[in-house]
Every structure is written in C-alpha cells, then in structure tokens.
C-alpha cells in the first residue's frame, strides 16, 4: 500500500494531478503514462483477486475478526435486513448485549471495529474522503423515507427526488438496489467481503467502502435493472437498456467512474448525489 501511495506521489504530485484527484473524485486521468498506473488499473479491473502489497487483518486477530463477522451476521438476522441498513453502532452494541441469540460484542471485537473505523483507509489503497467521521453517528428517521415499493431507504430531498426523477424518465425497469446505509451495515458488507478473502482489507475496499467512507451514509444510492439480481453489481449492467438510458441523461454522475483514481473498481450503478 505504501508503494501505491509513493507511486501516486512520484507520478502525479509535481503536476498537481494528485491534488486535483483528491479534490475532485470524478477526475479521470488523461493517459496511461507509466507502469505504476498500468499496474493500478490492472488491479482495479481484477479487483476481486489478491494483489501484492494488499493489507490483511493480522493473523493474530483472525479469531476476533471471525467472531465479529459472525456476531454482525446474527445481529442483522435479528433486526432484519430493512432495519439493519440504518442501525447505529451504539444501538447494535446495545441490542447484542440484550439478546442471547446475538450475545454482547467482546471488548476485543469492539476494539477491532474501532481500530478499523479510525484507521486511514488509504492504507488499504482506498482514496476517497470520509463522509461519516464519527463511529457513533446516527441516521435520523425524520431525514429518510422508504423508497417506493422497497424495504430500503433514501434520504429525503435531493436523493429521493433524484431517484423518482430517474424512475419517471427511465421507467419501472430501473430499481433501487441499495439506498441509505449506516455504519453497522457498512461494517458487515466490508467485513463479509474481507472475511471471504482471508481477511484481505485491500481487496474488500476495491469494491466496498470501509465503514465511514461510504457515501451511502449521506445520500448516494445504487440502481439496477429489475430481475437482474446480483448481476446489477457487475460490469454487465452496462449492457442493459437501463444503464444506456441512465448514461444518456447527461446529468447523472457516477461516484466511481471507469479509470478513477480512488482505489475503487468501476461502479456504473452507483449514483453520486452529494458533492
Ligand atoms: Zn453504491
């Protein structure tokens, strides 16, 4: 990871490209101009494979990591998928303590979660800003509304209006595939991905933002085509009429465009709503 950071500085800093990239996350560099960038792009295309310099959960913490993942899964099962999306860290800890089906998070588990939350995701190769800076941040019920015909939520105001406008323009073929996500949900998504890949945090962060770093926490959302299931989160989504029409609208911004410098794979389904 350090190699990646150094590489960026060597290739970009003098021209100000790095600064531009950090300030403008939709910036796309104009040309592939050295081996470092080639390596980086290859890594983003093969995001689901381990790469050298990837950062892992230390072996000594393997058991704690695994018990944390299992507990988060039990918590999600207990509160239900709909509620879990907006569950705060504190409420999750409290519910786990109250219900024997989940059992309280141990000190080591909460310490691991705190450590992950407050460490710099740049270490894994993830380069966006961090919209949620506090572990204990809460999503206020009054700020969100259920999306039409869905168990998922959208922030009221621009996100809700943007989604409605998209559905009006593109039709019922366009669906919401992920809306508002709180800290606990992001922990589970990020940890599940790392867990399935031997604790590889870098690999996980190439397709899932670490907790605190997800813009789903403040207004972004994902869309897909009805009936496509998990394929909505695959590059083949770009072959659909829904994507083509979405792209043709002109006013839609994708949070993680192709060839972005954010350490994230191309996500043609993730709509950027907030700045
Ligand atoms: Zn997304």
Image: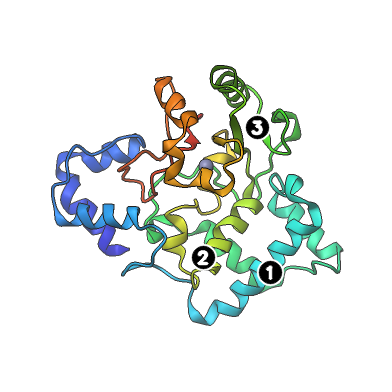
Task: Estimate the spatial distance between the alpha carbons at disc 2 and disc 3, rounded to whole Å.
Answer: 27 Å
Task: Estimate the spatial distance between the alpha carbons at disc 2 and disc 1, rounded to whole Å.
Answer: 13 Å
Quarter of the image holding residue 22?
top left
Residue at the spot x=75%, y=64% of the render?
74
Q: Nearer the viewer, residue 87 or 120?
A: 87
Instruction: Report the residue marked by disc 1.
Output: 70
Above-or-below relation of 249 to 178: above
Image mark for residue 194: 2
- Asked if residue 214 can be seen in this view, the reply is no
Image mark for residue 13: none
Q: Nearer the viewer, residue 232 or 127?
A: 232
Above-or-below relation of 45 to 181: below
Task: Estimate the spatial distance between the alpha carbons at disc 3 and disc 1, rounded to whole Å.
Answer: 28 Å
Give SS at disc 2: helix
Give SS at disc 1: helix
Q: Is residue 223 left or right of residue 250?
A: right
Q: Is residue 225 left or right of residue 248?
A: right
Instruction: Tell me the crowding category of disc 2: few under 14, some 14 to 19, or many 20 or more residues within 10 angstroms, Cα based.
Output: many
Question: Is the C-beta separation of discs 3 and 1 under 8 Å?
Answer: no
Cβ(mark 3) to ligand 1 < 8 Å? no
Badge 2 or badge 1: first in the primary sequence: 1
Residue at the spot x=46%, y=68% of the render?
200
Badge 3 or badge 1: first in the primary sequence: 1
Image quadrant holding the N terminus, namely: bottom left
Instruction: Report the residue marked by disc 3.
Output: 154
Q: How many badges with numbers are in the image?
A: 3
Residue 230, given in percent of the width and then of the height, sits at 56, 49
Residue 206, given in percent of the width and then of the height, sits at 42, 54
């Amino acid at each position: 990871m350090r190699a990646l950071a150094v590489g960026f500085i060597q290739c970009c800093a003098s021209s100000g490209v790095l600064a531009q990239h950090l300030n403008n996350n939709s910036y796309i560099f104009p040309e592939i101009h050295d081996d470092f960038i080639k390596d980086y792009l290859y890594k983003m295309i093969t995001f689901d494979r381990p790469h050298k310099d990837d950062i892992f959960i230390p072996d000594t913490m393997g058991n704690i990591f695994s018990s944390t993942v299992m507990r988060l899964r039990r918590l999600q099962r207990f509160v239900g998928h709909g509620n879990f999306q907006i569950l705060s860290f504190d409420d999750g800890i409290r519910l786990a303590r109250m219900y024997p089906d989940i059992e309280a998070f141990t000190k080591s588990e909460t310490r691991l979660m705190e450590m992950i939350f407050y460490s710099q995701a740049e270490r894994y190769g993830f380069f966006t800003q961090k919209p949620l800076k506090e572990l204990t941040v809460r999503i206020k019920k009054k700020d969100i509304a259920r999306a039409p015909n869905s168990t998922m939520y959208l922030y009221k105001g621009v996100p809700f209006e943007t989604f409605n406008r998209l559905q009006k323009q593109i039709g019922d073929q366009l669906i919401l595939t992920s809306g508002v996500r709180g800290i606990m949900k992001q922990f589970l998504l990020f940890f599940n991905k790392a867990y399935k890949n031997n604790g590889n945090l870098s690999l996980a962060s190439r397709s899932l933002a670490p907790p605190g770093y997800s813009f789903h926490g403040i207004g972004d959302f994902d869309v897909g085509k009805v009936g496509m299931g998990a394929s909505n989160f695959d590059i083949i989504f770009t072959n659909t009429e829904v994507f083509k029409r979405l792209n043709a609208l002109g006013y839609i911004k994708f949070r993680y465009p192709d060839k972005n410098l954010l350490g994230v794979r191309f996500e043609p389904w993730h709509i950027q709503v907030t700045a």
